[in-house]
Image: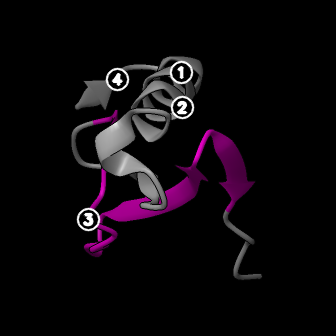
Amino acid sequence: MKAKTIEEAKSLAKGKSLEKQYKAEAIYIIYCNRTKYFYIDTDSLIRLWEQLIGYYENGTYTAEKSQS
């Protein structure tokens, strides 16, 4: 799934994380600099042009810590 804004991405990820089939599985929110979209997926594979924003698990959001 993809979204234009972080708010839309968080809403989609939270809804998906509450679905029975994704119980106890993390739903990642990844921003792609190349396409300028947020992607929601269960695959946490990050490519060079992407940035992990955070993830939902069982409806609970966890922000990714910055790598400063």
Name the residue type under label 1: Ser
What range of the chain is rendered magenta?
36-63
Check residue 22 in the rendering and tell me which mark sits there, or answer none.
none
> What residue did someone put label 4 on?
3
> Dots 3 and 4: beta carbons under 8 Å?
no
Q: CA distance from mark 1 to mark 3?
A: 18 Å
Name the residue type under label 3: Asp
> How many labels were placed on the picture?
4
Q: In the figure, 49 relative to 11: above or below?
A: below
27 sits to left or right of 34: right
Check residue 43 in the rendering and tell me which mark sits there, or answer none.
3
> Dots 1 and 2: beta carbons under 8 Å?
yes
Closer to us: mark 4 or mark 1? Answer: 1
Q: In the figure, 21 relative to 7: above or below?
A: below
What SS does tag 1 mark? helix
> What residue did someone put label 1 on?
11
Name the residue type under label 4: Ala
Check residue 14 in the rendering and tell me which mark sits there, or answer none.
2
Name the residue type under label 2: Lys
User: Residue 35 in the image: x percent, y percent?
Assistant: 22, 39
> Dots 4 and 1: beta carbons under 8 Å?
no
Q: Residues within 10 Å of mark 1 (few under 14, many from 20)?
A: few
* Residue sitting at x 69%, y 46%: 61
Is the N terminus in the top left, top right, bottom left or bottom right quadrant? top left
